[in-house]
Amino acid sequence: MIVVTLPLYECPSCSRTYDTLPQDDLCEECNIPLRPVERKKLTKKEKLSGTSALVPASRLMRGLGMLGCDISYSMEEKAFPLEAELSKLELITRAIQDAVSQMQNLEDLADAYLAIIAFGRNAQLITDRQGRPFVKSVQEILAEEGDGLGDYLRELFMSDSLGVDRNATNITEALRLARQITDQALSGSLQSFGVTHQIALDMQTVTRPKNQPALPMPNIRVMFYSDGKHNEGPLENAFATMQPASVLMTAFIGDEKADTDARMGADQMKALANICPKHDRKGYFLINTLSRQAFLREVYHMATGASGFCSQCLIKKDTKKIAS
């Protein structure tokens, strides 16, 4: 009688398998966290041959990018009226589509997740076409939407089927929701937001200037944009107290010099942004000319790929993934 013992853990990089977890839960070859696998019921042929197959017990969420989208009515105005007919809403949804499409050749699409929040007077995590919470792997998004993600988002935002009320801009409530999702992801569970499988965010070590010790950062990024000022109650930054550092990046869309409200809105978004732990710069981006629409696409790509914190990070890849 042949007894086949199947490994219970597998390295996502080298595919080495383990019957039991090492003391530190890391692959002895790659030094990255192992993922659980489940026993597969063997066929008679497999039992006789002593072969088996491994089936993942659950997918892991190793990285999460979150986008906060201002969908107030002013977003239907032209982004750059002297240069193009493109509306701000079209600019944003195209940039999100391009950022996701750029990721289609990456190896970890099943583990890289994207969440999208829409906000007006209120804030909501958006849903997919089936009404499910939009916290999805890039692999799922590409399979379900392909090149149609931008069109879907534009229709969803303009119709306001989410009921956020496009007549106002409440950045505070949107940031609170984003922080809630962030904290739950860090705790290892997003079940209340529709994710039923395991979460184990990778950690990154970020080198710092002036001989400061390296900073361990979770593989999560939050990117918010607005085209105007917050106008619903006091403006509060839910990420201001995040440790070891805020993961919030921000952008202002449009001419920041157009009027007093635009200047105030741009200043507000800049004030909310993190301080990049690597470059000691604000994680803030001003998208005020047509030439910067490509810049916005790269910012979204950086956020969804969890690869940086500021404009300098777009130039240099300064974060290195390590085992936590």
Image (tube, grey):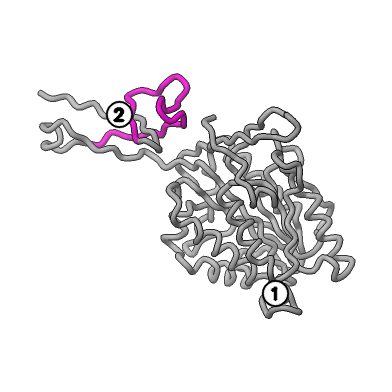
SS at mark 2 in the image: loop
Q: Is residue 38 above or below residue 169?
A: above
The C terminus lies in quadrant: top right
Taking the magenta stretch, the answer to whether it contains residue 17 is: yes
Span of residues in magenta: 15-40
Indicate left or right for 8 with 61 as reference: left
Residue picked out by circle 2: 7
Query: The residue under label 2 is which amino acid type?
Result: Pro
Q: Above or below — where is 108 with respect to 95?
A: above
Q: CA distance from mark 1 to mark 2?
A: 55 Å
Find residue 108 and report its horizontal and vertical position in percent.
45, 47
Mark nearer the N terminus (1 vs 2): 2
Q: Amino acid at mark 1?
A: Glu
- Name the magenta segment's main secondary structure: loop
Name the secondary structure under disc 1: helix
Depth check, front residue: 321 or 140:
321
Measured as percent of width and height from the top left, residue 63 is found at 53, 44
- The residue lying at 64 percent from left, 56 percent from top is 299
Residue ID for mark 1 = 76
Q: Position of residue 203 (x, y in %)?
A: 56, 35
Q: In which quadrant will I find the N terminus? A: top left
Query: Is 109 located above or below residue 84 in the figure?
Result: above
At label 2, counting other C-alpha atoms closer than 10 Å, the crowd grade (few under 14, some 14-19, many 20 or more) is some
Q: Position of residue 89 (x, y in %)?
A: 66, 70
